[in-house]
Amino acid sequence: MRHRQLSSPESTRPTRSPVQLARHFGARAHVTRDGVRTLYEALVGDDATPSPGRAALEGWKRRASSAYGHDLDGASPMADALAEHFGLADRSGLGFEPRRPAELLFAVQTYYALVVKLLVWQTLASRHGTPTAFDRLSRAPTSGQLQGEVARLEAGGVLKDVGVVAPWNADPFSWYTAAWDEPVERLVRRLADRLRPIDAGATAEGAGASRDLLKGLYEDLFPKPVRHALGEYYTPDWLARRVLDDVGYRGEPDARLLDPACGSGTFLVAAINRIRARWEAAGRTRGWEPGRLCRAILAGVVGFDLNPLAVLSSRANYLIAIGDLLGRTDGVRVPVFLRDAILGPNDWPEHGGGECAGGDRVGRFDFVVGNPPWIAWDDLPDDYRERTKPLWHHYGLFSLSASDARHGGGKKDVSMLLLYAAADRYLKAKGRLGMVITQTLFQTKGAGDGFRRFRLGRGGAWLRVLGVNDLVACRPFPEAANWTATITLEKGSPTAYPVPYVKWSPEARAKDHRRDTGVGQVSNVPGTMESCSTHDPEARPEECGGEPPMARRRYQAEPIDADRPTSPWVLRPEGLKTPWARLVGPSDYQAHLGANSGGANAVYWVRVLGAVDGGLLVRNVTARAKRGVESVEQVIEPDLLYPLARWGDVARYGVAPSCHLLLAQDVATRRGIDEPTMQARYPRTYAYLKRFADVLTGRAAYRRYQQRAAFYSMYNVGSYTIAPIKVVWRRMDKRMRAAVVEPVDHPLVGRRPVIPQETCVLVAADSADEAHYLCAVVNSAPVNFLVASHSVRGGKGFGTPSILDYVRLRRFEREDPRHLDLAGASRQAHEATQRGEPVAEIQHAIDRLAARLWGLKERELEVIRGELGSAQE
């Protein structure tokens, strides 16, 4: 999104959209930069005069740390980015201290909160013919009178005339009124002047057309690195509407809907639009009364959030969405509550809104929808992890052994827990839940197993999956590197497989695929390219609330292992009728990860510089090291050096080791060679490793698992690691790229087997023929399809050793001509790759040979190839 600053505060161009609100009050506006500095300095105070905002700051930090999963006081790239964004970094005399990042974040949030409250006042007053914020504030002649008007705003008094009660109750952002001085007064007057061009009529669109007006301003004030660190990615309006469509919410006045992590209120506003549209349509024939409509909305559309700023934003959007209905009923309390949906009690909180007019104090909901926060378990505050741990176990979301979790299968996300807790606590029987979640939960072995139980605890209610939308290719959150999906569930019955599963992609790409291959069932679905009320040629359709044009491909999803309902899902495209039993494993082979340094690659990876004094002079490879390691040159013995195959060294049908690995490991004990032996046999190598003892003993995995072993011990090393002949492929990729590796001759090191690093996977083979057979099969279209169908492309689970649990790969038999033909084709592909020649024709032959192993027909192979082509890199 581009940002242009308006020429002056006196501009008369009306503010009509989220984009333009960001231009008036965004980070590039002088009033904003000066305002943030003013509020920051007021918060910091000085030694003689403690800040009046200190108590509010401390209360905010306690709650915000749970909402964000971060220590807000610590220096971080987030604080640096925020300071840079407002021109406060590395500037003298501006009052910013890098040691006070929490104060800076709270100052920006306070500025945003003040602007939001003023916008609500301006908009609602304009609608109802009462004095606007601009009218009242610009006419306050003295500082004391202006302070009184602002205090009245913070107390909600300006909205009493339209029947709204205490909209900003339990708000920590009003502290600045107690810190009132000349700079704060100047900020308020400048903001009031900026309110003049607000076009309330345009901002408050007609029934059924309101949307989240504030997220554009929020995203402008809080730059991408900050929002990424805080896990904040606001839901596009079109995505909220799609989730409502999927759960079947049509705006029925007697249906109740909850967003348990409502953020700025996108889902709530979308739901309000549907109620209004339904009532207005009915009003054309039967008539309708606005007060009754207002009460129906307040009773039926409810939000929770743990973040005070999100609650404020959501209440503001809610009020704007029903602004023309206010004044028709008394005692309106916006039903958006400051509440932890996971740990909170089952009744409404006493603070932050109280009872809503016309609504129940307790009860469950017909619909639960939303976009829960995506915060990894490891990033949660320690006390929050401990408080929620019983719930993780209760819902079966912790389902791994300690060993599985240690090797990468234990990545949990709080969105999993919130979905289960919300379905348990707030959803009625037969009610429906629709949420935005990470797609990896459907196809990740380990971390996703517990999630795929779809039952609320042992003996609890079942959750039936009605469908999944895979939006990974569409990237609804373009600033985030995540895998986005939506899920629709119904409470009360078990999931019946297969489940409808739809992959969405940008329309142009899907059209190109259909034209080029003619394979697969592609349905082009033009997005709702709604008119953009900004009339801004720079704005994309989705910025205006419209849905980008997308196309879809339909699949049937089911557990890949029929005997394990929690196993990863495999996706069958329309047109493929082959029984899974032909393709699905287990394999006769076992795969392993490559050698793992435990985070000390810069110690173990070396380049051989030459022969010196009976040894080899080496230099460690420190480029791209995650931790600072000294670059040294030292003479060591050649005995423990092996050619190293790094991730980037591995290609389809070719491996080119680019450096050496120092492997001081006993493959029998799976620990480092004992220190007395190292000192006696390899004294120079031991001296080299000793230089890095602090680094090696500081490795987290070493401290946790191998403290009794030699300090240079490594991981994932066994006899298979040093096998002379291996098949190697990349882990964390978008397709299988396997190659055969045999021992390499080096003029100084000698002939040694190649060792892959842990970002690669290996299978040890007994012969070159067996290795080439395996390599051809792993690179074939059927295996690529099967792996892609139950794994996350590009994710950490793609290509892991566990893929062989589900690939029915039979052991090499020299008497089987199909196996020998595959081995021969792999050799041809390796030779062609070494010469720099294309291997497309050879690969097509390999695909046909591999298809024969599983009895696939030519048409089925073409469907598989077409499916792989639809996810081109």
Image (spheres, rainbow, N blue to C red):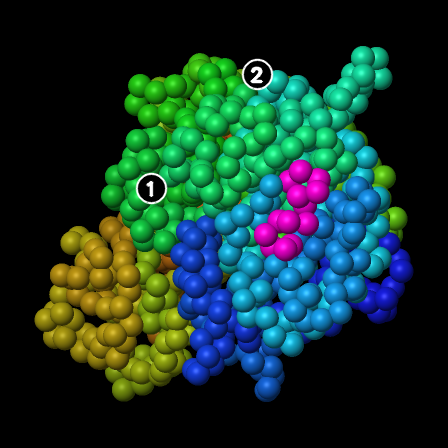
Spot occupied by residue 669 in the image (x, y as percentages of width and height): 16, 54
Indicate whether residue 158 is drawn in magenta. Answer: yes
Q: Is residue 604 left or right of residue 862?
A: left
User: Can you give x and y, in whole percent of width and height, for residue 632 in the image?
Assistant: 36, 82
Q: Which residues are magenta?
A: 152-164
Q: Is residue 807 left or right of residue 700?
A: right
Quadrant of res 357: top right
Where is residue 796 drawn, in percent x and y?
45, 47
| Observer-nearest of 731 and 504 | 504
In the image, 596 versus 76, the foreground residue is: 76
Can the viewer see residue 368 in this picture? yes
Check the image and report above or below for 862 versus 827: above
- Residue 462 lies, with reference to residue 616, above or below; the image says above
Question: Quick one: quadrant of the N terminus?
Answer: bottom right
Identify the residue position indicated by label 2 in the image: 577
Residue at x 52% of width, y 19% of height: 431
Spatial CA span between label 1 and label 2? 44 Å
Secondary structure state at the residue bearing disc 1: helix
Q: Residue at x 78, y 31 (%)?
A: 207
> Is 839 located above or below residue 174 in the figure?
above
Please name the residue shown 44% across and 75% down the image. 50
- Which amino acid does the dot numbered 2 rest on? Lys
Image coordinates of residue 449 in percent, x first then y, are 38, 32
Q: Main secondary structure of the magenta part?
A: helix
List the residue tagged with mark 1: 388
The 10 Å Cα crowd at callout 2, few under 14, some 14 to 19, many 20 or more, is few
